Structures are given as structure tokens and as C-alpha cells.
Amino acid sequence: MDFFLNQLLNALLLGGIYALIAVGYTLVYGIVKLVNFAHGEVYMIGAFLGVVAISSLGLPFWAGLALAVLGCGLLGLLIEYLAYRPMRQAPRLAALITAVGVSLFLQNLAMLVWGSEPRAFPALAPSGEEHFFQRAILGGRDGAGAVFIPGKFVFIWSITLALMLLLDWTVQRTTIGKAMRACSLDKGAAALMGIDVNRVISFTFVLGAAMAAVAGVSYGLYIGSQIGFRMGVYPGVIAFSAAVLGGIGNLRGAFLGGVIMGLVEVGARAYLCPWLEISGGYSVAFAFAILIGVILVRPTGILGSSAVDRS
Amino acid sequence: MKSSRTFLGLAALAALAALPLSLWAAEPIRLGVAGPFTGSGAMYGVMIRNAATLALEEANAAGGIGGRPIEAEYGDDEGKNDKAVTVAKKFATDQRICMVIGHFNSTCSLAGKPIYRDAEVVQFSPGSTNIHVCEGSDYTFRNLYRDDYQGAFMADYIKKTLGLERVAVFFDNDDYGKGLKDAFVARAQAIGLQVVTVQDYVREKTSDFAPLLDLARNAQAQAIFISGLYAEAGTIVKQAREKGIRTQFLGGDGVFGPGFTEIGGEAANGTLITTPFLFGPSSSEAAKSFAKRFKERFGREPDTWAALTYDAVTMALDGIRAVGTDRNDLRDWMAGHTSREKGFKGITGVTYFDHNGDCLKPVMVAVVEGGRFVPAPKQME
């Protein structure tokens, strides 16, 4: 039982981080119908900004996180303005290739600025945050038979859930959220209703990038190392898959998709692979198998609208 | 004043230039020394070059061999197999070179092997551990263990020296990690050490090791053997500590490096790893003396690879003293070191070979203490 609970905690944590990245894909896709392949790199730069703020500038964790969110928000704004806005009337394939280009550009930029060796997440002030993050909220210290929840698990879940609720509320209940939904349905009509479409699109990119920054810093805190210029590629692919699984363009779907990807990946590693007596490395393959299965049955994803794509 | 100083300088230069000629009228004996002197492995190359330089300077200061000085010809393979081929061809065709010390990287030793074999010249590696390096050539030797040997050794060490019964294995899914893991598991099964779970991971893709660690904890592993490189190993011990897992961690020489302690931090302490040799308080007098001379000459501490290179060069010089500079005589002399009693006693221990040219030297175990690798208190005989 304790094994199950421990692995469930691992899965939910991983899933929560996938979900935070996935909402960035889904928000942008929902409004401009673009798969933003540079999103994984925004996540990577968020992690780096957090690490640099904490280790080089000596800021406390919260300030590092805030700096990463601001920095990535600005980056999201710039990416949209410089790279995607000029391509908005271009064929979708051209925009997609631009996104791949931005992704490669950001990876190489990060390599030039921060080097090619992966970094460790800095140690935090031992009495303050480090104490909170390391302390066992629940559970014993050693061996089997203990469910172990360090403070950082609680922190990452709380912030993930809080952000998801806030985001959902923003999209469903606020004026800018209504404008986002309007743009998603029909940008031309939205503009005729007096909505500043450019402003809405910029806002969407900033929102997605800020979520990616939180995911990046959280993941750095959780993993403790391997902050490198290529760290965004793999979670980016998984999170994109999660967004598709949940129904791309649907916010709650992205969250659900992220959690499912985490559950399947960890569940396969913990139960399925040992039972089938195959290598645990196949666990990710099961996550993708679920994705393919769902898409075959429901091409729009679990919570995706069944409306035919008009473009 | 100025002119007289210039004159004195010139005279001194002339004297210096004349000195070797007058002392060494005889033709020098030449050794080839191959290694990664530039490129990403250059830090290994510096150690190799310095150790070889020291060995030759000491031999020459003692009068050389049979009145002849010994010189080294350095070949830079940059740690790449194509460059290694170029170096090997140069050494092989230069008949004045009686033996080659090198290469360092396994891939370079493997690339040079057929060339040295065809030219009938010994290649003697102080750094290559891939299991295939010495296969299929009578002219290839090394003075450190093979990857499968360190894997088997670790299994023995866990069972016999540490007295543990249940071990989990995490391995990097590449040639090094898989080879080391296979050797470890095979030996563990042979000696009755229970391997409770074997989990693979992919470098640069797997970064969340929590599910693997919980599998090991659930299987009640008393030790976790990491068959991979330092970056992932550092991440694993760090995450284990945060999950309250205080199992004994062990690793192969891929974990041996400052990167491990930088990433792992506090959690790295207590990890046991295998290494061919390590300087420490329990080193022999000869090793301590070498470390002191090396530091005096180059201003820095020697490392494992410097010690192995020094042993390789001094062993080659012993051979030249015994049988002269004929390439085949030297090969036969090397191959004659078939047992511990007949072995060459160097600073890293006794070097002797099996029929392949693989070295049967014991493995040393190092432990991380206060962020540094030091010899472990419990070594296996």
C-alpha cells in the first residue's frame, strides 16, 4: 500500500508539471491555431532564470520564481511579436517551421549564455525555504513501509492547483478571458466587436510562458539538477502530447492530459513493466500508446469539442 | 655592460646546446606516447604527458639505458578514433619507436589496434577499460581493469566486504552502462547476491528518478548500484536523500569525478565507487614519493591517470633494460608477466596480464567524504 501511495505521489507530481506546460500549448493553439514548438524552450529558460536568480544573485526562492515568471512572460511577448505576428497571415506550415526555428534559436542562445554543462539546482537557505522543502510533512525516514512527502511535493501541487484554478477562472469569468474565447472562435468577428485581437494574443502568450516558467522552476526544485539547454525538448514533447490527449484548445483537457501522462508513465514503470518483465524504459512508450489509442477513438481528445475545424 | 650580458647569454645558450650532444653521443631510445593532448579530454592528456615526462627525466638523470638517453614522441589523438589512426600509422612506420604507451580512450585504443598489430609494436594503454580493447591482438596490453571486471568486483565487494544481501541496479542504457550492468548482474547471480530490481534510464531524458527509487525501496534493497555516469548518479543520490532513502549507493568509475559531488552535494557523501587507483593516506611509500616529485615538477597533484601512465612508462623502460629495443622482444617480455609473482611492481600495484593482455590488477574502492573521493576504509583483498 505504501508503495502504491508513494508512486501515486510521484505520478501526480510529474503529471502536475506536465499539466503546467501543457496549458501553454493549449492556450496558444486555442487562439492562433499554432503548435508553439518553442514552448519547451520557454520552460527551459524559466528554469535557468530561477537557478541564476537564486545562485548568482542570491535571491530567495520566491523572488527567483517571480523573476523567472516575469522574464518568461516578457520572452513570450517577444517571441509572439517578433516571430509569430509577421507570420500570422502566412500558411500554417510556415508558422510551424518558424516555431521550430525559434525553438532551436532559444536552445543555442541558452547554450551560449549558460554553457553546455547541465547545472544543479542551488541549495536554498538551510533554515528557511530549504527547511520547509526538505522537511517530511508526512512519513518516516527510512526503509519500506513509509509514505514520504517532502515539503516541496506539497508546494508544487499547491502551486499547480492554484494556478490551474486561477487560469480557469480567468478564461471563464473575466473580460480578457471572454475576449480570449471570442478570438478563439472567430478573430475577425471578435475584432468587429471591438476586441483588440493583438492584445489578446499577446496576453495569451504571456500567460502560457508564465506557466511554463513556474513549471521550469518547480521541476528544477524537484529534480535538483540537470538544468541544461536541452532540458525542454523532452518534457515539451510529452506536454504537447498531453494537450492533444486532453483535447488541444481545451484548458481543463490539458490539465487532465498532463495528469494522465504522469500517471501512465509512472504506473507503467512501477507496475506494468515489472509485470510484463520488460525494461522500465518502455514506460514512456505506454504513455504514447494511450495517446494513440484515445486519438483513434476520439480524434479531438478527451475533452476536445467535436466541432469540425474550419481552417 | 649590455654587450657583455648578451655575450654571456649567448655563451650559456651555446653551452646548453652543446651539453646534450656531449653527454648523449649515442642515438636516443624512442617511445611513442599517445593520448588526448587537445580536445575535450585534454585534462587527461596533461596528466599523461606530465607523468611520461617525469618518468623519462628521472631515467635520463640516472644515466639513461646503456648510455643512451630515452625520448618520447607525443602523438595527439584528441580522444577521437580517426585521429588515433593517424597517430598509430606514424608511430608504426617510425622504426626508431620501440613501444607505444597509449592510447587513453577505449575508442582510440581500438582504432589503433590493427595498425600496431600489423607493425608488430606493443601498445600499452593506461586508460582504456572497454572489454574488447585487448582482444585479437598479441601486441595490445593495458595496466588497469576491464569494465566487466569492475562490475564483477562490485558484486563481490557488496556481498563479501559489505556483507549485504539485496541490491538494486540502475543503469544508463548505453554501451558503458549496459556492459557494466551485465557484468555486475552475472557475478551477483553466481555468488548469490540478490538483484531485487534492475531499472534502466536514458541519459538527458530521464531526470525524475523517484519512481525508480520507490521500486528499490519497495524491493527492500540494501544497496543501489548505479551503472552510469556522474551527472545522473549525482541526481539519483540527491533525490534519494530527499525521499528519505538512506541506502548504500555504489557506482563504477563513470561516477568518479568532481561533477558527482558537485551535483549530489551532501547526499553524495558515503557513496562507494571503483577506480583503478587513488592517492590517499594509505598509498604505498612509492606512490607518495611519486606524488611529491610530480607536484614539485609540475605544481599540481597527480591523478589516477598520471599514476597509471607513470607505471606504464617505467615498466616499458624496465623492458628495454632487460631485452633491448627490438619490438618483438619487448612484446614477449611484456607477455611474460603472467602472474602476480612475475608482475611489475609499480606505484599503482602489481601489473601482470592474462593471455589477452588484460590486466589482473585489483580494483580500488573510493568513498566520498566531505565532497572528496578518498580510499575507502574497507578494501577487498
Image: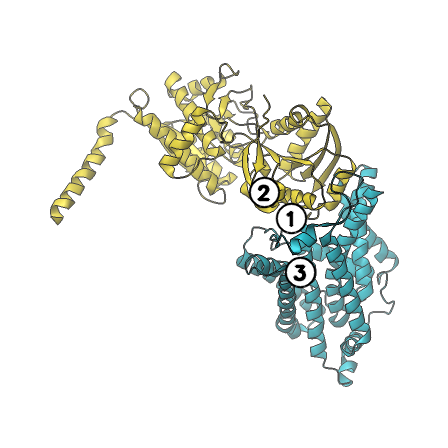
Chain colours: A cyan, B yellow
Q: Residue furthest front?
A: A127
| Residue at screen point 87% across, 67% down | A306
Element type where label 2 sits in the image: helix
Residue B305 in the image, given as x and y percentages of width and height: 48, 33
Element type where label 1 sits in the image: loop
Q: How many other residues sit within 10 Å of disc 1, few (<14), some (14-19) or many (≥20)? A: some
User: Circle 2 is placed at which residue position?
Assistant: B260
User: Circle 1 is placed at which residue position?
Assistant: B204
Q: Chain of mark 1?
A: B
Q: Amino acid at mark 3?
A: Tyr
Q: How many other residues sit within 10 Å of disc 2, few (<14), some (14-19) or many (≥20)? A: many
Q: CA distance from mark 2 to mark 3?
A: 25 Å
Tags 2 and 3 touching, CB below 8 Å: no
Disc 2 or disc 1, which is closer to the eye? 2
Q: Amino acid at mark 1?
A: Glu
| Residue at screen point 61% across, 34% down | B272
Task: Residue A44: name its quadrant.
Answer: bottom right
Q: Is residue A258 visible?
A: yes
Residue A187 in the image, given as x and y percentages of width and height: 76, 78
Which of marks 1 and 2 precedes in the sequence? 1
Element type where label 3 sits in the image: helix
Q: How many other residues sit within 10 Å of disc 3, few (<14), some (14-19) or many (≥20)? A: many
Q: Amino acid at mark 2?
A: Phe
Residue A43 has which mark? 3
In the displayed structure, B124 sits above or below A311; it is above
Q: Chain of mark 3?
A: A
Q: CA distance from mark 2 to mark 1?
A: 15 Å
Q: Nearer the viewer, residue B216 or B83?
A: B216
Q: CA distance from mark 3 to mark 1?
A: 16 Å
